[in-house]
Image (spheres, helix red, strand yellow):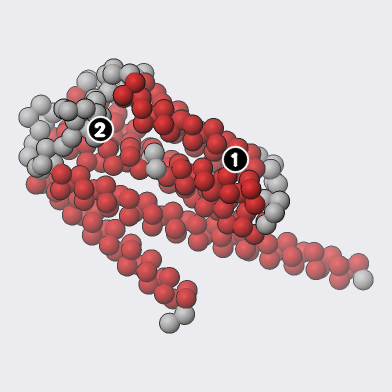
Amino acid sequence: MSRPAILRTVAWLWFLASIVVLVIGFREAIFLVPTDAAQGDAGRIFYYHVPSSMLSLIFPYINFLASLAYLYWRRRDPLKALTSDALALTAAEVTVVYASICLITGSIWGRATWGIWWTWDPRLTSMLLLWLLYVSYLMLRRFSSAGQSQTLAAVLSVFAAVDVPIVYMSIRWWRTQHPAPVFGGGPDSGLDPSMMPAFVWNIAGWAMWGIFIMCFRFALERRRQLAEQEAALSAIEASLETAQ
């Protein structure tokens, strides 16, 4: 079996495994976990809000490291720089997806529990800022002039990465309206054992889904880059033939 065929097979198996794990996580979260005594069924949003929140703080660092690699390789090895840039772009797209899910599910939970869709709590505000930074990253790449977008976006990613630890620490530095940390928040933090299977299945499923989407988009972006290079090479060869 050729290498592309093996990669396609692995991709399909990974995709199917992701769907299976997500379905199991959905069943655990919606049908098997006991209803929370204080929050009612609104508490089930936890199994989608917390995994998306955690993953939205992990993929930015893939974007950050890939952007640093791009800045390092852009004058030394353009081919490696392009590969790094494709990885940075796809990680930013996945970050926007997870940050959007986090903000939307958080707002739904806030409306059901607090009676409001939004409040300028430090955790909510810093997460919204993270989302805006990565949306700006994608818009910058789309609308800036050709030849500068990758470098400008890579520089922006360095600033965006600074917000990630602020988001993570916000509920530890400022104990305001947002609930206390679920993990690592002191003696009262942690999950009840009855909640753990639903949480583990969901965070595993959403992580697998995010990895699949990132790899899929990375392959598409690399294909676009290679097609662009071939088109540019063909244009140069055609101009040389015309000059002769």
Give the quarter of the figure containing the C terminus: bottom right
Q: Which residue is mark 1?
A: 153
Q: Which residue is mark 2?
A: 184
Instruction: Establish if 10 lies above or below 125.
Output: below
Query: Between 184 and 228, which is closer to the camera in this rendering?
Result: 184
Which residue sits at x=22%, y=20%?
115
Which residue sits at x=7%, y=29%?
37
**Relative to residue 223, is residue 241 drawn left or right?**
right
Mark 1 or mark 2: which comes first in sequence?
A: 1
**Relative to residue 44, is residue 123 drawn left or right?**
right
Instruction: Establish if 76 lies above or below 135.
Output: below
Of the two numbered discs 1 and 2 in the rendering, the one whose residue sits closer to the viewer: 2
Instruction: Establish if 157 lies above or below 211.
Output: above
Which residue sits at x=16%, y=27%?
188
Query: Residue 49: percent from the left, percent from the top?
Result: 27, 37
Determine contact: label 1, label 2, CB under 8 Å: no
Amino acid carrying label 1: it is Ala
